[in-house]
Amino acid sequence: MLAVEQLTTRYGSLTALHQATLRVDEGELITLVGPNGAGKTTLLTSIAGLLRPAEGRVVFEGRDVTGWDPARLVRAGLALVPERRRIFKDLTVAENLKLAGVTASAADRRDRLARLPEVFPILRDRWTTAAGFLSGGEAQQLAVARALMSDPRLLLLDEPCLGLAPTMVDVVFDLLADLRREGRTILVVEQQARRALSIADRAYVLRTGRIVAEGPAAELAQRSDLFEAYVGGGQS
Ligand code: ATP
């Protein structure tokens, strides 16, 4: 479904991503793990059209989408939940969702607005609450729900558990596992490597801008050498 080929991204003279290659097949949950500053966000935002890679290609469902702007990618079926949840704090939960559905037809938007509260019961209870009053976990669910308003075939998530209390981390991981069971295809960036590996099909480990390991999540989880060296035992 997604093929990232030899992607290199630079910030001025700093090369943050060196020839990264990865693939996500339909129905897979893939996790991309690595320490702070490894280039995880750079890779995800390069895929989602927020950064323009200097070299390499992003191929989505057989089409070369390198350099497409994010709105066009959303219409093509690829949605990003950015790091630190970009939601509109002064708008209600319902308004946030309606705005996120602007790329859909009116009928699809109505349909999704009706179905999302079944997936996120917490949001149903907070439907008319301003998003700024949501807890961290609720806000994260709203961020994921916003992305689902475009009914993406591929969902990219950047550190969805960042800053959440442990119980809310459980909620978000359960949600990801549920979405995968529903057949969504997911690429999630996560610092909590072991946790992410426990729900993922396959994983990629990124370090200083390079993919240094990849494979089935269960196999990579056995590689304690890798995680002590690359991710840090404490965070995993
Ligand atoms: P974290 O887990 O801390 O979010 P990350 O793995 O997502 O880290 P990136 O945010 O992609 O890493 O950063 C990769 C490298 O690029 C780092 O060295 C970072 O300092 C640098 N970098 C990131 N954004 C910019 C920017 N806008 N301008 C210049 N350098 C940047």
Image: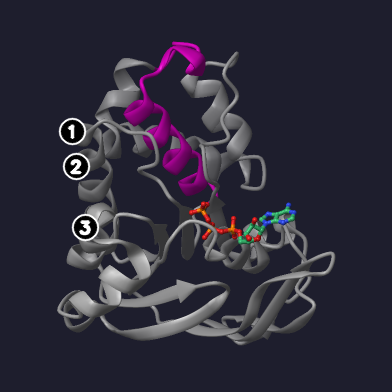
Name the amino acid type tagged 1: Thr
Disc with the residue nearer the chain's start (1 vs 3) = 1
Crowding at mark 3 (Cα within 10 Å: few <14, some 14-19, many 20+):
some
Q: Is residue 222 above or below residue 228?
A: below
Dot 1 falls on a residue whose secondary structure is helix
Q: Residue at x 50, y 59 (%)?
A: 152
**Residue under pointer 2:** 170
Disc with the residue nearer the chain's start (2 vs 3) = 2
Name the amino acid type tagged 2: Asp
Q: Residue furthest right?
A: 12
**Residue under pointer 1:** 167
Front residue (pair 11, 5): 11
**Distance between mark 2 and mark 3 Cα atoms:** 10 Å
Q: Is residue 214 magenta?
A: no
**Residue under pointer 3:** 195
Q: How is the image coloured?
A: one colour
Dot 2 falls on a residue whose secondary structure is helix
Comparing labels 2 and 3, the label whose residue is closer to the camera: 3
Crowding at mark 1 (Cα within 10 Å: few <14, some 14-19, many 20+):
few
In which quadrant of the rendered view does residue 99 lie? top right
Please say if the residues under marks 1 and 2 sit with CB atoms less than 8 Å apart. yes
Q: Report the disc number at residue 202.
A: none
Q: Residue at x 61, y 47 (%)?
A: 104
Q: Give x and y (percent) for residue 21.
A: 55, 86
Front residue (pair 93, 206): 206
Tell me the magenta residue range: 127-150
Q: Give x and y (percent) for residue 44.
A: 57, 63
Please say if the residues under marks 1 and 3 sit with CB atoms less than 8 Å apart. no
